Amino acid sequence: MKHPSFLLPVAGILCFAAACSKPEQDDAQAGTVYQIKVQTAQAQQRHFRKQIRVQGTIQAYIFTNVAARAAGNMELKVDDGDTIKKGQTLFLIDQDNLKNRVAMAEQALKVVEETYRSTQLDIGIAETQLEKAQKDFDRNRMLHEGHAVSDNAFETYEVALDKAKKSYEKAEAALRNDAAKVDLVKLELEIAKKNLSDATEKAPYDGVVAVKYRENGEFVGTGVSIIRINDPKKLRAACLISAVYFEAIKPGVTPVTVSFRDRKVEAKVDWCSPVIDTLSRTFTMRAYLPEGTPLMDGMLVDVDIMLAERDGMGVPRDAVILKKGGKSAVYAVKDGKAQEIEVETGITSDGFTEILNPEAVAGRDIIVSGQYFVNDGSAVNVTGTK
């Protein structure tokens, strides 16, 4: 009896399957266990640093916008980038005209002082004449009372005394007027000298001409800015920081490192803005640098802000596995099997993660290679340590 031809391939497949299943059954019967190759390391005591890096701008925090204090044509004595010394002349304004005004005021003062001295002489003469008229009047009044002098003659002495009194009063008024003129011209002279002084602007401290707003020979008005000078020895780093770090950065406490190429400067946060910008969600932070720091106003620098720093127990960063619910865990080897250990993590720095419950990992062999292929209870084969 012939079998249908389509049954032959099916029979072949069944025979192949039966042949393949035999070794598996043999392995199971022999108790073979597949082990995952791993490497381990022990937790270490380390120094952890939590820091952020932002970009900052170097600023001169002592600077002056020097403005004209007088109006006129300007003679500029410095240029952009010039190094200046305290007391050095920066610019002059309308010197000839202002010097002439001082000279005119000095001459006017001489004139009114001479007039004043002349008036003093006049009042002295008037005083002498008054005394003489008073004596003549007193003498003739006694004679008049004794009928030794006629009424007509006595009236002459009365008129002379009255005239002398009025002359003295007039001389006194002239003296007061001339004294007022002297005071007025002295004031005008002081103003002229002040205007001349204001037209000669000198450097208030050693520094550098950072900006030149006007050119030599321009006519400038009072209050117009001419140049800006900076003190290059007194610098600060200014940064914009995300609002999430507002409470973590403490003025006078938080250390920073300012870096520019191969230069590093250690400092502390000196000031933070008391408000957060509503649009950018940032705040301004400033750190004042040691005097003489070899940086320049306007430079862009890297600023490392140390938010936290402490010693603690840590494991290699890759050993920490993030589990469901935001929890973290590591795997340790115990009796040839992986044991899951829930951990609380802290700062991660230099390739290590801080463990806040160090008693859970202390002295344990923590899986640092192959950890992503194991589960709690997985058989493992430790091939080495790190």
Image (cartoon, grey):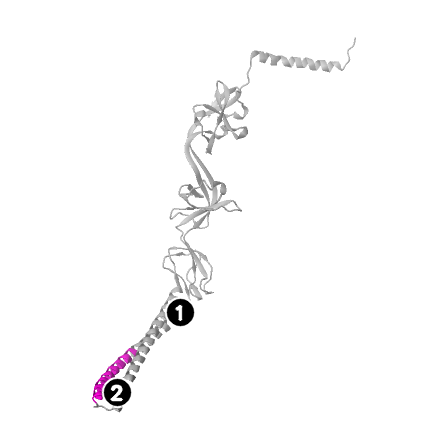
Q: In terms of secondary structure, where does tag 2 sit?
A: helix
User: Can you give x and y, in whole percent of width and height, for residue 195 in the image?
Assistant: 39, 67
Locate the N terminus by quadrant. top right
At a point 42% along the width and 48% down the height, the residue shown is 236
Locate residue 94, reporting x and y percent. Answer: 42, 67
Judge from the rendering whether residue 12 lies leftward or rightward of residue 55; answer left or right.
right
Q: Residues within 10 Å of mark 1 (few under 14, many from 20)?
A: many
Q: Residue 87 shows which numbered tag?
A: none
- Pick whichever, 108 or 290, lies toward us: 108
Q: Amino acid at mark 1?
A: Leu
Q: Residue at x 44, y 35 (%)?
A: 49
Answer with left or right where residue 163 lies relative to residue 362.
Answer: left
| Identity, as a three-letter code, of the amino acid under mark 2 | Tyr
Q: Is residue 361 visible?
A: no
Mark with earlier residue (1, 2): 1
Q: Are marks 1 and 2 in contact (CB under 8 Å)?
A: no
Which residue is label 2 attached to? 157
Q: Quadrant of residue 193?
A: bottom left
C-alpha gap between disc 1 and disc 2? 57 Å
Along the line of sight, which residue is nearer the eye, 53 or 347? 347
Could you tell whether 41 is left or right of 160 in the image? Answer: right
Q: Is residue 108 magenta?
A: no
Query: Magenta stretch?
Result: 119-146
* Mark 2 neighbour class, 10 Å CA radius: few under 14, some 14 to 19, many 20 or more: many
- Using the rendered image of the protein, determine whether residue 211 is visible from the camera's viewpoint: yes
Q: Write the residue at 62% across / 12% down.
A: 22
Mark 1 or mark 2, whichever is nearer to me = 2
Going 30% across and 82% down the picture, which residue do you hit? Answer: 166
Vertical side of 318 occupied by 72: above or below: below
For residue 98, which numbered disc appears in the image? 1
Answer above or below: position of 276 versus 165.
above
